[in-house]
Amino acid sequence: MIQKEFVLQNRLGLHIRPAALFTKIASKYKSDVFLVRDRMRVNAKSIMGVMMLAAGQGTKLTLECIGEDEEALAAELMILIENKFNEE
C-alpha cells in the first residue's frame, strides 16, 4: 500500500471539475484508491465519494493506493494534485 499526504493547493478545492479528473484517472487503474480526510475514508473512484469530503483549499488529505499498479496510480494522481488540477 502506498500512502501520500498532501494539502490541496488549488483555490476552489475538490469541486466537481477536479473531482471528475481525479476519479477519471483513478478508474483507469486496477488498484483500489481511497482518499482520507480526518476519519472519513472514501472510494476515490467514486465522484460522489470524493465530493463528500467537501475538501476546500488548504485541506489535508491522505491518498491510499492498494494493488498491483499502485505505484503508477499514485504517481499520476500526485502529478495532478501538484499541478493544482490544471486550474491555475
Image (cartoon, rainbow, N blue to C red):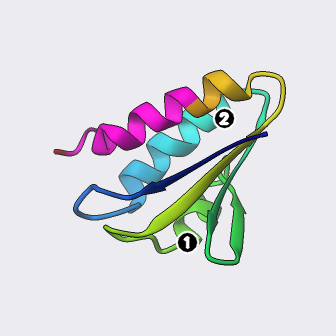
SS assignment at label 1? loop
Q: Position of residue 50 (x, y in %)?
A: 57, 61
Farthest left residue in view: 88
- Judge whether residue 8 is colored magenta: no
Dominant SS in magenta: helix
Q: Residues within 10 Å of mark 2 (few under 14, many from 20)?
A: some
Residue 2 left/right relative to 5: right
Quadrant of the drawing holding the C terminus: top left
Camera-nearest residue between 52 and 63: 63
Farthest right residue in view: 67
Quadrant of the drawing holding the N terminus: top right
Camera-nearest residue between 28 and 13: 13
Q: What is the magenta range?
A: 75-87
Q: Position of residue 22 (x, y in %)?
A: 50, 43
Q: Quadrant of residue 41?
A: bottom right
SS assignment at label 2? helix
Q: Position of residue 49 (x, y in %)?
A: 64, 63
**Alpha-carbon span between mark 2 and mark 1:** 18 Å
- Mark 2 or 1, nearer chain start: 2
Q: Residue at x 63, y 21 (%)?
A: 72
Camera-nearest residue between 27 and 13: 13
Residue 2 left/right relative to 84: right
Task: Identify the amino acid type marked 2.
Answer: Ser
Residue 45 left/right relative to 75: right
Task: Identify the amino acid type marked 1.
Answer: Leu
Answer above or below: position of 25 versus 46: above
Answer above or below: position of 43 versus 3: below
* Discs 2/1, front: 1
Q: Residues within 10 Å of mark 1 (few under 14, many from 20)?
A: some
Q: Position of residue 53 (x, y in %)?
A: 55, 71
Location of mark 2 (residue): 27
Location of mark 1 (residue): 53
